Image (tube, grey):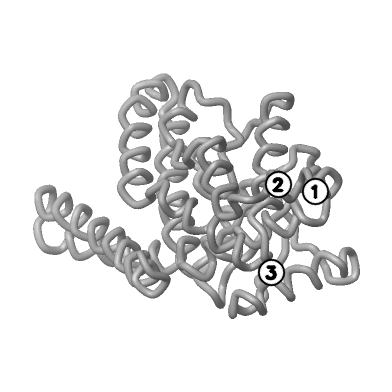
Amino acid sequence: MSGRLLVVWNVLKAWALLTGGCALLGTIGWALGGYQLASLLVFFALLVAGAAYWYGDRVALGMLGARELPLGESPALHARVQRLAGLAHVPKPRLYLLPDGHPRALTAGRGVRGSAIAVSQGLLGAAPPAELEGVLAHELAHIRNRDVLVQTSAVVVATALIETSRIGGWLERTLLFVLGPVASAIVHLLLSPKREFAADRAAAALTGSPHGLADALLRLEQAAELVEFRANPATEPLYTFNPFAEEGLAALFITHPPVGERVRRLRELDPDWREKLRAA
């Protein structure tokens, strides 16, 4: 799928999520209380959708404990993102820091003019420059393709459903048993693993080499095996790769393709890389 078609497709999916949510609440309201309740619920859905559109990135990043990274605190990182954003022909996104040692990165927002990239302290400390650039370029590709709009919308809705189950008291397990699969279905309906392959290819083009991102993916996967990661599993689509153990509730929300397959496809973009490595 070409870049322009991918953008259009992602925007259509965001509209489909809004329309479907309003239709569902309107139907429930009509069945329970007629026109007045249906109108009230649709109006409420539109308010929530508007808030999610404008503040979805802050909600997602707030759930993860990220804080905005000032220019003076990390000028080199800001300069690197500025350069890559220029190559991607998108405005420089806001930068956030995840203050923990688990190496990971994510992006959230509503599009090219309202998105943010968050990187962890662990990623900044562990990734060499080429790998860090590959990860940042991957996230910028999601912003350029408007994947970020659909990802953030799906994560906010899914997280809200999962968190709703926590207010059930002794009914919590039953609510989670019902709402968990519903949240998972929304995520998988809106998000295809193909978006990651497209972002990987775009990152390779932006950085001029597929190997920085390929090496970063291998490093992140190895770190995930060594360090336990805890967060709301519904946030899985936001990350560069899946940092969760593929078990329990987290298994319902996996939208990333296997790292091995992504690395293989990236290496194939430079089929002579082994010969170049031997020559070096």
Q: Are discs 3 and 1 less than 8 Å apart at CB?
A: no
Total count of labels: 3
Q: Are discs 1 and 2 less than 8 Å apart at CB?
A: yes
Residue nearest the viewer, comparing 138 with 36: 138
Quote the CA–CA distance across marks 3 and 1: 40 Å
Residue type pointed to by label 3: Arg
Residue nearest the viewer, comparing 180 with 108: 108
Residue type pointed to by label 1: Ala
> Is residue 239 shown to the viewer in this render?
no
Quote the CA–CA distance across marks 3 and 2: 39 Å
Compared with residue 146, is residue 154 higher up or lower down, i.e. above or below?
above
Quote the CA–CA distance across marks 1 and 2: 6 Å
Left or right of residue 15, residue 60 in this image? right
Residue nearest the viewer, comparing 165 with 89: 89
Density class for disc 2 (Cα within 10 Å; few <14, some 14-19, many ≥20) is few
Residue type pointed to by label 2: Glu
Ranked by sequence position, the earlier of labels 3 and 2 is: 3
Q: SS at mark 2?
A: helix
Q: Which residue is mark 1?
A: 279
Q: Residue at x 60, y 66 (%)?
A: 205
> Is residue 72 shown to the viewer in this render?
yes
Q: Which residue is mark 3?
A: 94
Residue 261 position within the rendered picture, expressed as x and y whole percent measured from the top left? 51, 38
Q: Residue at x 26, y 62 (%)?
A: 16
Q: Can you tell which mark lies on residue 275?
A: 2
Residue 189 position within the rendered picture, expressed as x and y whole percent measured from the top left? 30, 47
Q: SS at mark 3?
A: strand
